[in-house]
Image (spheres, rainbow, N blue to C red):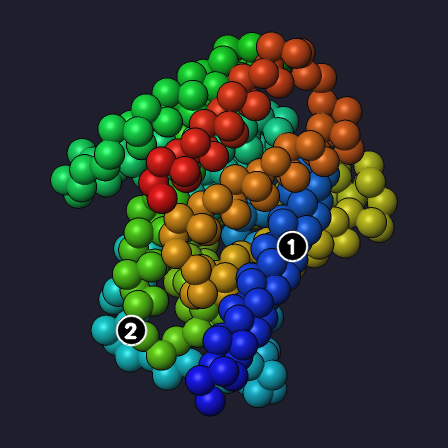
Amino acid sequence: INIELPDEQARAEAAQRIKIGLYFATWWALNVVFNIYNKKVLNAFPYPWLTSTLSLAAGSSMMLISWATKVAETPKVDLEFWKMLLPVAVAHTIGHVAATVSMSKVAVSFTHIIKSGEPAFSVLVQRFLLGETFPFSVYLSLLPIIGGCALAAVTELNFNMTGFMGAMISNLAFVFRNIFSKKGMKGKSVSGMNYYACLSMLSLLILTPFAIAMEGPQMWAAGWQKAASQIGPNFVWWVVAQSVFYHLYNQVSYMSLDQISPLTFSIGNTMKRISVIVSSIIIFHTPVQPINALGAAIAILGTFLYSQAKQ
Ligand code: 3PG
């Protein structure tokens, strides 16, 4: 037994690493597809409040069907669970709609460069609002993150204030969402997949009235007709793709959050942004100046330094 144990342990660890690796690869691939279709839709149909709502609606319906057909196990949740979920859902809704508004105004790569500054927001929120302190090296790593994002922003050829602010608001909201979700998932019998399903449903309820107030059916109908006549029958499939892929990438990310620390999660998230930035620049032929790319590279390097410092 003594001889076999370390072997078994090594095997279990290797299997866990492979599992997390597969989760990460799937999460990034789904996210790239979402970002491409989301931007294609927004270029033709600039109504981010509706597209954000449709993403949540698609996820909610997919999960309701999965529960009804017993493809996924229905979670056992009580009123206490929904109460705990409410602040997470508010933060998720704000972060999601703000990112989508941002992407409707600027290049996908620009939104994600600003969103790579999320760790800086996380440290500032934890320091000033929650009173947690960090080693000096962590604060030092914020300099390249903030400096790099600032350089990328001021040299961005198609800078737009709403686009910039949307990404900043999304950063702030997602910091709160991640702190609250990790707390809410701890010690609960609800799996990462079902936790995200409930989150989508609650966010959908919150977002729908705001989407109607901000844009509304009249604008949507006119915009839809225009987009469908420009793009043709494929337009509806683009909308379906952005909605379904939004749910899938988030579901996989929550399935991994279930298994890993928030720190590993945020490193995975930054690596995800690199794949999105590079692929969207290629696909949408986004013009990038060398100084602009340098800013993005410094910001991303800063995020890696941050993860080292936090470890
Ligand atoms: C959204 O629409 O919610 C954003 O694209 C999310 O961005 P993130 O999941 O990459 O932080």
Residue at 34 percent across and 67 percent down: it is: 185
What residue does disc 2 label? 187
Q: Is residue 302 left or right of residue 244?
A: left
Say if mark 2 contacts mark 1, CB within 8 Å: no
* Of 172 and 97, the residue lying toward us: 172
The residue lying furthest to the left in this view is 131
Tell me if residue 150 can be seen: yes
Q: Residue at x 71, y 44 (%)?
A: 37
Quickly name the residue at label 1.
25
Residue 228 image point, x, y percent: 78, 44
SS for dot 1 = helix
Q: Nearer the viewer, residue 121 or 201?
A: 121
Horizontal and vertical percent position of residue 53: 52, 52
Residue 182's quadrant in the figure? bottom left
Left/right placement of residue 273 relative to residue 175 reads right
Residue with the most extreme front position: 3
Q: For the point 66% across and 11% down, which residue is it?
A: 290
The disc labelled 2 sits on which kind of residue?
Answer: Gly
Give the quadrant of residue 258. Answer: bottom left
The answer to whether residue 242 is above or below residue 13 is above
